[in-house]
Image (spheres, helix red, strand yellow):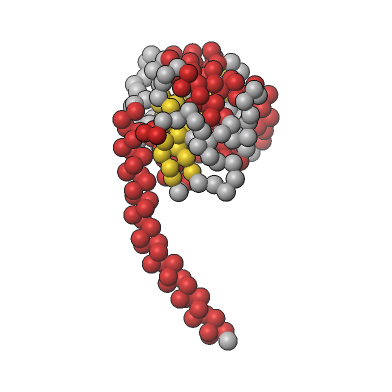
Amino acid sequence: MKEQLSKLRMRDWTETRAHSSWQIFKIMAEFVQGFEVLSRIGPCISIFGSARTKPGHKYYELTVEIAQKLSQEGFGIITGGGPGIMEAGNKGAHLANGKSVGLNIDLPFEQESNKFIKKETSIDFDYFFVRKVMFTKYAQAFIMMPGGWGTLDEFFEVATLIQTQKFIQTPMVCVGSEYWGGLFDWMRKTMLEQEGNISPGDLEMIKIFDTADEVVSYISEFYTHNKLQPNF
């Protein structure tokens, strides 16, 4: 019985290996499509945040304002393409007649494409890791609005890439001091002062703002003396 079970497991594993070999072509296709579309759009800002934030909520409306003003500065806006904060970012770009990009992914809950993205700037992904590359390669700044697990995942990944200099130093902004303050207090007191797991400069590379004007001014000022270019 044990030998038979082992053979069945090996057969399943062999079939999985065969599927994995062909899977690489799907992954390559997603990279190629993403690079081709985004490289034509030009400098963009990636905005992250909760899919659950409703229109009328202060952070939804603040995201609209930030995206609209950044679009007026000439930046395209990249979001995850879904509802909530993502929709707000695309709406702001739409209101300014700017470039509104949606990087959609198929999820069992929450995710559906919002109406403020044109067909030619909406890209669908099956793989989270490919989608993450697209968020980072052409973004000239990263704006973290309040969000859940996905936003925190993106927050720490972007912070790690900047801290390790895997791509060019790029503005990273958290919006909403009442939301992000507790996390930064913990990082400062526990990660930095108590355990020494990060350096003081690691926190200084991330700014916390509460208004659209602060965000736009910081990013605009950064690019008065830094070059606009892909991050890698």
- Check the image and report above or below for 159 versus 95: below
- Foreground of the two, 172 or 133: 133
The total number of labels drawn is 0
**Residue 107: image location, x then y, percent:** 54, 47
Q: Specify the quadrant that holds the C terminus.
A: top left
- Foreground of the two, 137 or 50: 50
Residue visible at 63% across and 31% down? 53
Instruction: Let me know if residue 3 appears in the view.
Output: yes
Q: Place residue 155 in its image quadrant.
A: top right
**Residue 174: image location, x then y, percent:** 57, 26
Q: Specify the quadrant that holds the N terminus.
A: bottom right
Residue visible at 38% across and 14% down? 224
Q: Place residue 88 in its image quadrant.
A: top right
- Check the image and report above or below for 56 versus 19: above
**Residue 48: image location, x then y, percent:** 53, 32
- Check the image and report above or below for 129 versus 230: below
Q: In this view, does 21 lie to the left or right of 102?
A: left
**Residue 80: image location, x then y, percent:** 49, 36
Instruction: Let me know if residue 222 appears in the view.
Output: no
Residue visible at 35% across and 44% down? 31
- Foreground of the two, 81 or 16: 81
Residue visible at 37% across and 53% down? 26
